[in-house]
Amino acid sequence: MRVTLFALAAALAAIPALAQQPGVAVPGAQSAGPADPRVNQLIVYGDDPCPASTDEEITVCARLPDSDRYRIPPNLRDNPNEPASQSWAGRAMELQYVGRSGTDSCSTAGAGGFTGCLSQMINLARAERRAAGTDINWTRMVEEARAEREARLQAATQEEEEADRATPN
């Protein structure tokens, strides 16, 4: 009996999908089109060329010196947990949280102790990024590449419209 009801419920749930005509846009559905191109992030060294962006893909390149081509990445070169590489300010911040429990503490003790775990992970990620010293801002570079792509597409559209106006019907 349960199996029959389950099969009936599954069949009824699939009916709206079968009723849709192919090629007809569904309201509220998002389409992946030219507005959301794929983003390719590359690191190029020295005078190596950066591959050109296409209509389907935005290519963003960060350029590093050629002397870094075969080196271990800077964030893996030294031990960040080494006591000599920690500042006094960092040690004082650690002491601030000793014995802390309760709300926003990310501990198993106290009511709401779990609430500070996300904040703690975000703060640790930011501290690691600052300590790594990488000055590559991928977000800014992708936004600039998107703006360039948009300007290029608008210029191409404008040229097409001007060519259509210039041609007699």
Image: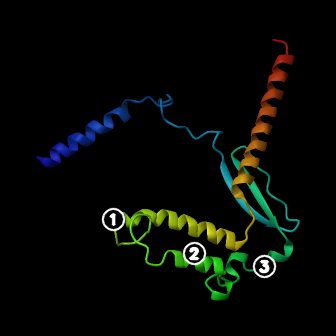
Considering every residue shown, the one lying at the far top of the view is 169
Q: Quadrant of residue 160?
A: top right
Q: Amino acid at mark 2?
A: Met
Q: Position of residue 57 (x, y in %)?
A: 70, 49
Mark 3 nearby-residue class (10 Å; few <14, some 14–19, many ≥20): few
Q: Quadrant of residue 4?
A: top left
Residue depicted at x 71% and y 51%: 142
Q: Position of residue 43 (x, y in %)?
A: 76, 65
Q: Position of residue 20 (x, y in %)?
A: 41, 30
Q: Quadrant of residue 132?
A: bottom right
Q: Are marks 1 and 3 in contact (CB under 8 Å)?
A: no
Side (left or right) of 5 relative to 155 = left
Among the two numbered marks 1 and 3 on one chain, the one whose residue lies closer to the N terminus: 3
Report the colour scheme.
Answer: rainbow
Q: Nearer the viewer, mark 1 or mark 3?
A: 1
Label 2 sits on residue: 93
Q: Nearer the viewer, mark 2 or mark 3?
A: 2
Q: CA distance from mark 2 to mark 3?
A: 37 Å
Q: Amino acid at mark 1?
A: Ala
Secondary structure at badge 1 equals: loop
Considering every residue shown, the one lying at the far right of the view is 47
Front one among 130 and 73: 130
Label 3 sits on residue: 70
Residue depicted at x 82% and y 33%: 155
Mark 1 nearby-residue class (10 Å; few <14, some 14–19, many ≥20): few
Q: CA distance from mark 1 to mark 2?
A: 23 Å
If the image is split into quadrants, where does the C terminus sit? Answer: top right
Residue depicted at x 78% and y 62%: 62
Among the two numbered marks 1 and 2 on one chain, the one whose residue lies closer to the N terminus: 2
Label 1 sits on residue: 111
110 in relation to 26, above or below: below
Side (left or right) of 35 relative to 120 = right
